[in-house]
């Protein structure tokens, strides 16, 4: 096959989807201290533990001869690219991270970053969400990113306010029932 029709692995092309461009026009990447610490721990684990082990495996496999059919070598090189890509991504995300302490707002009834908000829809169904950073939010745990449509609608509202949410099925009004913040800084 002619090489002109094969795609070379170009790390720049692979990184385009992972670029750590600023999440908003202002370029802020708000995150809690615990979220920041988790990302940093992952980065250090990749740099200090996982990457050296894979480098050692690739080095060992490269000494075994024919690399074109050497599974350890091929898999190791692929895994190294994945690790390096994740390291670059985490490094860029941590560089633009702005750590916020939600406990500063303890006792406040207005919705800011880090708030746990309970709201009710037109049918009386109550939903509780926590507004967190892009890199730490987990929908399965009731956490949403601060740039999500629901969080943007709720931000700066107060207990008792009625806000409009834009949903795929149309617009819906919800009432903010409760706003809570953690007691202590998140470690």
Image: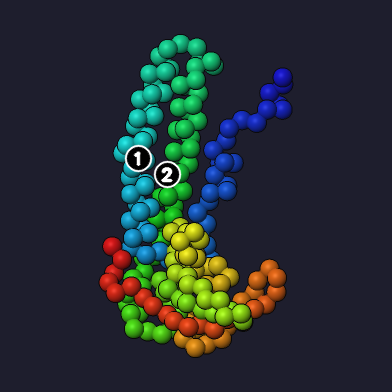
Q: Which residue is mark 2?
A: 87
Q: Which residue is mark 1?
A: 47
- The quadrant in which the C terminus is found is bottom left
Q: Give whichever of discs 2 and 1 has the lower sequence position.
A: 1
Residue at figure coordinates x 48%, y 72% from the top left: 128
For residue 117, the mark is none
**Label 2 – label 1 distance at C-alpha:** 8 Å
In the rendered image, residue 139, in percent from the top left (x then y), is placed at 50, 61
Q: Is residue 186 above or below residue 181?
A: above
Residue 146 visible here? yes
Q: Are marks 2 and 1 in contact (CB under 8 Å)?
A: yes
Residue at the extreme bottom of the image, as rendered: 160
In the rendered image, residue 170, in percent from the top left (x then y), is placed at 70, 74
In the rendered image, residue 178, in percent from the top left (x then y), is placed at 44, 81
Label 2 SS: helix
Q: Nearer the viewer, residue 127 or 80?
A: 127
Q: Is residue 83 above or below residue 171?
A: above
User: In which quarter of the view is residue 95 placed?
Assistant: bottom left
Residue at figure coordinates x 44%, y 39% from the top left: 84
Residue 26 visible here? no
């Amino acid at each position: 096959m002619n090489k002109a029709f094969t795609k070379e692995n170009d790390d720049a092309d692979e990184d385009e989807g992972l670029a750590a461009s600023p999440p908003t026009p202002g370029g802020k990447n708000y995150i809690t201290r615990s979220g920041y610490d988790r990302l940093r721990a992952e980065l250090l684990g990749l740099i200090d533990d996982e990457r050296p082990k894979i480098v050692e495996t690739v080095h060992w496999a490269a000494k075994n001869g024919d690399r074109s059919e050497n599974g350890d070598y091929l898999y190791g090189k692929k895994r190294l690219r994945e690790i390096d890509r994740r390291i670059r991504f985490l490094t860029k995300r941590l560089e633009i991270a702005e750590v916020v302490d939600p406990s500063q707002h303890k006792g406040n009834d207005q919705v800011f970053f880090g708030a746990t908000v309970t709201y009710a829809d037109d049918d009386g169904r109550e939903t509780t969400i926590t507004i967190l950073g892009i890199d730490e939010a987990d929908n399965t745990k009731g956490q949403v990113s601060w740039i999500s449509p629901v969080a943007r609608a709720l931000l700066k509202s107060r207990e008792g306010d009625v806000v409009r949410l834009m949903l795929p099925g149309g617009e819906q009004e919800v009432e903010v029932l409760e706003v809570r913040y953690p007691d202590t800084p998140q470690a």
